[in-house]
Image: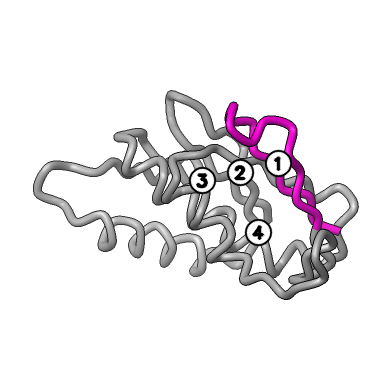
Amino acid sequence: MIKVECPEEILAGKVALFNEIISLENNQPVDPGEFLLSFLKNGWRWEVDYSEATQEEILLWYRYDCAIRVIRALREGREVVFRREQKWSLGESQNLKDVAQEIEDAIVAWEGGVSISRDDEIGLVISARE
């Protein structure tokens, strides 16, 4: 089971529960990418709890969670760090989509697992596991 919480005032304390892509609230399928993208579009923060998730659920939701956090960080002018070695920020002449794609390519090329170590006002840090 996936739990998504929005700490923003308008939705404070609201938790959405999913069994893979099925909403447990209304038993309807949900596209994880579109669902999390709606938070980005509304300027809301989110937290995803993977503690009760199956491996399949983690694989399905985590890639969208990570990708959309990268876009949010770049839009907000925060630095994105991957493996402590690679760092990106959005310069004035750079295209958001191009920089986000470069980050995604680096993550996909990494053959180990990844996790979000930090996502705060300073930046987004994505750690790599062997």
Q: How far apart in space, not on screen, are marks 4 and 1 (Cα)?
A: 15 Å
Give the mark nearest the N terminus, 4 or 1.
Answer: 1
User: Please, which residue is most extreme toward the left here?
Assistant: 93
What is the span of residues highlighted in magenta in the rendered image? Answer: 1-17
Report which quarter residue 99 is drawn in: bottom left
Kind of residue at disc 4: Tyr
Q: Coloring scheme of the render?
A: one colour
Give the mark nearest the N terminus, 1 or 3.
Answer: 1
Report which quarter residue 105 is drawn in: bottom left
Residue 83 is labelled as 3
How many residues crowd mark 1 within 10 Å: few (<14), some (14–19), many (20+)? some
Q: Is residue 38 above or below residue 46?
A: below
- Eye-nearest disc, 2 or 1: 1
Give the mark nearest the N terminus, 4 or 2.
Answer: 4
Kind of residue at disc 3: Arg
Residue 21 seen anywhere in this rendered image of the structure: yes
Image location (x, y in percent) of residue 130 = 68, 56
Give the mark nearest the N terminus, 4 or 3.
Answer: 4
Q: Is residue 44 left or right of residue 88?
A: right
Residue 116 is labelled as 2
Kind of residue at disc 1: Glu
Q: How far apart in space, not on screen, are marks 4 and 2 (Cα)?
A: 10 Å
Write the residue at 50% across / 55% down.
Answer: 38
The answer to whether the residue labelled 3 contacts the one labelled 2, judged by CB atoms less than 8 Å apart, is no
- Eye-nearest disc, 1 or 3: 1
